[in-house]
Image (cartoon, rainbow, N blue to C red):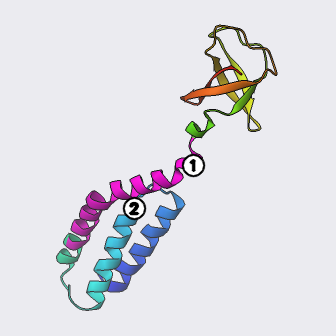
Amino acid sequence: MAWYLWIALGLVIAALELAKPGIFLIFFGIAALIVGGLAAADLVLAGWVQWLLFSVIALASLRLFRQRLLGRLEARDGADRVDTLVGEVALPTADIPPHGHGRAELRGSTWNAHNVADVPLAAGQRCRVVQVTNLVLDIRPE
């Protein structure tokens, strides 16, 4: 395949990664760009060698670097996690019986809430979030 087609393929694949992030396609895009650069420098001429290099580079870089990148991005996004809601004040929108479920308002949004206390919660009563489980706030009175 001509070198400029490899470059175009690499750019298209990289653009697809931007459209649907998942840190997966970018490795194939980079591999296509590398093979395009090697073909442009006349270092790799045979088509089967280009495809073999593309496959090996893409799969090896995917295997070697994907988990590291995901780990770094997760560590950086830690401040946006739902777990940071622990300790915040939530207000039940209706009465919630002891160990019952209901809705509570927190940071301007309404959440599913679970009363983990042995006493009922009244609507509008200040409560503390003690845990977040599957996007359900475990709350108890202050």
Image coordinates of residue 28 in percent, x first then y, are 34, 66
> Residue 35 vs residue 79: left or right?
left
Q: Is residue 74 magenta?
A: yes
Q: Quadrant of residue 135?
A: top right
Residue at image mark 2: 25
Residue closer to the observer: 119 or 62:
119
Q: Quadrant of residue 98?
A: top right
Name the residue rendered at 39%, 74% in the picture. 9
Q: Quadrant of residue 27?
A: bottom left
Q: Mark 1, mark 2: which one is toward the viewer?
A: 1
Name the residue rendered at 63%, 13% in the picture. 117
Image coordinates of residue 126 in percent, x first then y, are 77, 24
Image coordinates of residue 94 in percent, x first then y, are 79, 17
Residue at image mark 1: 79
Name the residue rendered at 46%, 56% in the picture. 73
Assess whether mark 2 and mark 1 are in contact (beta carbons under 8 angstroms): no
Q: CA distance from mark 1 to mark 2?
A: 26 Å
Label 2 Cα crowd, 10 Å radius (few <14 / some 14-19 / many 20+) = many
Q: Is residue 133 magenta?
A: no
Label 1 Cα crowd, 10 Å radius (few <14 / some 14-19 / many 20+) = few
In the image, residue 45 above or below residue 134: below
| First of labels 1, 2 by sequence position | 2
> Residue 86 vs residue 122: left or right?
left
Which stretch did the figure color magenta?
A: 53-81
The mark tally for this picture is 2
**Amino acid type assigned to the residue bearing label 2 in the image:** Leu
